[in-house]
Structure formats: C-alpha cells, structure tokens
Image (tube, rainbow, N blue to C red):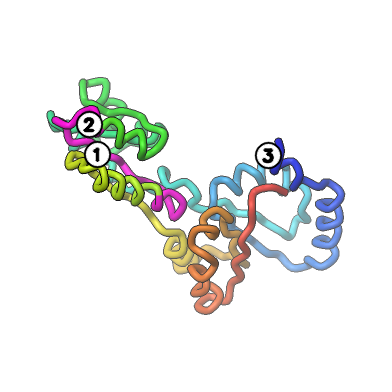
Amino acid sequence: MKYIDEYRDKELVEKLVTQIKQVSKKPVAFMEVCGGHTMSIQKFGIPSLLPDNIRLISGPGCPVCVSDRKYIDQAIAYSRLDDVIITTYGDLIRVPGSTSTLDQEKAKGAEVRIVYSVLDALEIAKKNKSKKVVFLGIGFETTAPSSAAGVIRAQMAGLRNFYLFSSHKVMPPAMEALIDEGVQLSGYIAPGHVSTITGTSIYQNIPKKYGLGVVVSGFEP
C-alpha cells in the first residue's frame, strides 16, 4: 500500500534488533498505550525479535474498554426516552452497563443508530428535527476534535436538536495513574497520531515526576 509499505524495511529492522541485543543487558519493561501499537507489535511479531530481558506491556489503549459504566448507564437511560435518537460508534453498542446494553435497548425498540462519524449524526439530526439526537462522543485526543467540530457545525446549521454526550479522555493521566498504582515500567511508547494533535508537551510530567522516558512512535516497523 503506497505511503505505508515504503516505511517497512526488513534490513533496517534486523540491524536495529542486533544493536538492541548488543546494548540492552538489564531487564526492562516498556508499555505501549495505544491499541494501534498493540496490533502492529503482534502483527509483525516484534516480541519474538527482542531479547528476553525486554518486555512489552499493553496499556489502556481502547477508549471503549475504559469507558465508565456510569456513562453507559446514562446513555441507556437516554435511549429509553421517547423523543431521543442515540447515535454511536459500533464498538460501543455491546458494552455492558449495570443491567443492559445499547444493543439490547435497540432490540426493545429504542432508536439506537450506528454511525461512522459525527457528520452522520448531524445528518440524522437534520432529518429528524422533532427528535433529540444524542451523539456518544468517546475516544482519546484523536477523536475529541471531530466531536468538537460536530458541535460547531450543528451551531452553524442552526440545529437545536443535536447533543454531544462526551466521554472523551486524555492519555497522560491514565499513564500517570498506572505508575502511581505500582506498575513497574522503564518507559512508555506513546502514540504518534495522538501526539500529532497534542504535541509532545503533554508527556513532560512523566519524565519530570517519575524519571521515565516517553518515546513517540508511528505504527509501521
């Protein structure tokens, strides 16, 4: 695939692995905090290339997986209102709340619609002006701008029936919480797409407070 395959260089990887084995002697553990990194690491068999003293740990990379149950319960409560249409990404629809899921509520007759972007939710709001259209905004720093753009577009279009129910999260507090809870790490591998939006300054407290390095990486080996 153009602009992706070009970044894959087997010879370079082999040289880097050799250098890593030469310089890395003590046990270390690095955590990747993005699900995209976890997929790439497993897809390309990176753990098998590394020496035994280097351990890669998968962190809280999925915003759906770390969604608060109270948030799911509230979304379910909204879905039970007669004048509400819930719009959500598909990966949230089966996440359990305390007693139900959005998928189960949909089966009971609630208007729960899967969308691929906030723009889809805006279109639904335009076509259903007698209903309150609630967009479930989840994700880390990467999806927050698109949710905000949806609110701005709704305002520009004069849509008074569009609502954003936000559960957006930021990455650094989660990274710090893991260290505070006693997870033994030598450093973090931070996601490139998040860092493109935020810059690297959001991670500065981690080396300052904990003495751990944070390296920003893309997703191609």
Q: Earlier in the sequence, mark 1 or mark 2?
A: 2
Q: CA distance from mark 1 to mark 3?
A: 36 Å
Q: CA distance from mark 3 to mark 2?
A: 38 Å
Q: Residue at x 54, y 51 (%)?
A: 34
Quadrant including the N terminus: top right
**Image-based side of 4 in relation to 60, left or right:** right
Q: Bin the neighbour count of mark 1 within 10 Å (Cα to Cα): few under 14, some 14-19, many 20 and up.
A: many
Check if mark 1's residue and mark 3's residue have beta carbons within 8 Å.
no
- Residue 17 shows in this picture: yes
Q: Bin the neighbour count of mark 3 within 10 Å (Cα to Cα): few under 14, some 14-19, many 20 and up.
A: few
Q: Residue at x 57, y 46 (%)?
A: 36
Q: Position of residue 133 (x, y in %)?
A: 22, 36
- Give the residues in magenta: 125-145
Check if mark 1's residue and mark 2's residue have beta carbons within 8 Å.
yes
Q: Earlier in the sequence, mark 3 or mark 2?
A: 3
For label 3, the residue is 43
Q: Position of residue 102 (x, y in %)?
A: 29, 31
Q: Eyeballing the image, is 101 above or below 217?
A: above
> Looking at the rendered structure, which numbered label has been put on residue 134?
1
Tell which of 167 and 143 is nearer to you. 143
SS label for mark 3: helix
Q: Residue at x 22, y 21 (%)?
A: 108
Q: Does residue 175 belong to the magenta stretch?
A: no
